[in-house]
Amino acid sequence: MSVAATAFKHWASTVGLPSGALPLARQIGISRSTIQAQLLRGRVREGVVVAAARVVGIAPVVALSSFDEYDDLHLKMRPPLPIEVLSQIALTDAVVELLTRRNKAYAAAIEPLQVWEDPPLPDGLRLWVDAVDPGHIRRELADRLGMAPPNLSAQITSNRMKPRHLLEAARIANTSLTSGLAVGGVITLEEAGWPADARSRAITRLPDVALNDLVQSRLASAQRGARRLAADSAEARRIEEILG
């Protein structure tokens, strides 16, 4: 659900940005060929809007809400659900918390390792979808988007979903639309309205058993990713050998 190029050009002029592809590309840090291709096709992707908004100091959610395709985005901006927050805690941060609890002497040495990086996190999209799933999210999302379920699953597994798909998932889950965009890396968690300390507070409140489960879940996720990577590498070598 990219935005109309004509609407983008008008918006750019109202915030003091050039409409030409080359000067605009230079100002927002995106290649000229990318900008030009999107303007020629008549659709500008959300990433360009977000980059432009950041340059001129406008909140990306406010900027996106200026376009018809996202006119309700700012109205559906709510604090994240606790399950969403936990879904975006990376393996490293969970392990640091676990080690700190087991031996307080570790705390000072490993505390700097808790970086709370912004999405997209490894397997973060699947974890978020599973966390907010009311029980039928994949089936209903595939129906709404007119996609075959295997194609949707492939998007989720590869950690890449289009912004409009993320919005539809958030609508089905009845959660903040901005959270959907954040877990996909379109905007940051802070830009989505998440408190800066949301994840650190959430993990410190977890009972030990729940924290152990979280670490185990992240380890399993990392193992799946490693296996997929190994399988892809093996397949690439096999094809290379066949082709000579």
Image: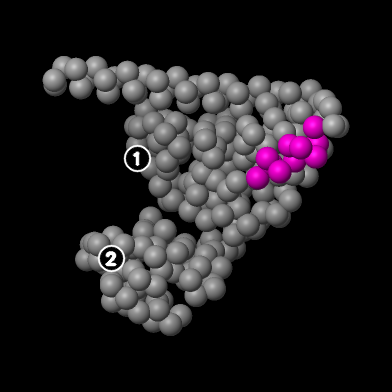
- Vertical arrangement, residue 119 with respect to residue 30, above or below: above
Q: Residue 150, position in %: x, y?
A: 37, 28
Task: Say whether marks 1 and 2 touch (CB < 8 Å).
Answer: no
Colouring convention used in this rendered image of the protein = one colour
Q: Circle 2 sits in a helix, a strand or a loop, which is it?
A: helix
User: Residue 119 versus residue 27: which sits nearer the camera?
Assistant: 27
Residue 62: tell me if it is visible.
Answer: no
Give the residue drawn at x 45%, y 19%: 227
Residue extending furthest front? 109
Does the magenta portion include 94?
A: no
- Vertical arrangement, residue 142 with respect to residue 212, above or below: below
- Horizontally, residue 77 falls left or right of residue 187, namely right
Q: Which mark is residue 146?
A: 1
For disc 2, the marked residue is: 32
Report the span colored magenta: 106-115
- Horizontally, residue 229 falls left or right of residue 34, namely right
Prevailing SS of the magenta stretch:
helix
> Which amino acid type is shown beneath numbered disc 1?
Gly
Residue 44: tell me if it is visible.
Answer: yes
Give the residue drawn at x 63%, y 32%: 91
Q: Residue 84, position in %: x, y?
A: 64, 41
Q: Residues within 10 Å of mark 2 (few under 14, many from 20)?
A: some
> Which amino acid type is shown beneath numbered disc 2?
Arg
- Vertical arrangement, residue 222 with respect to residue 129, above or below: above
Q: Residue 153, position in %: x, y?
A: 42, 30
Quarter holding the C terminus is top left
Q: Circle 1 sits in a helix, a strand or a loop, which is it?
A: loop
Instruction: Please tell me which of labels 1 and 2 falls first in the chain.
Output: 2
Q: Quadrant of residue 235?
A: top left
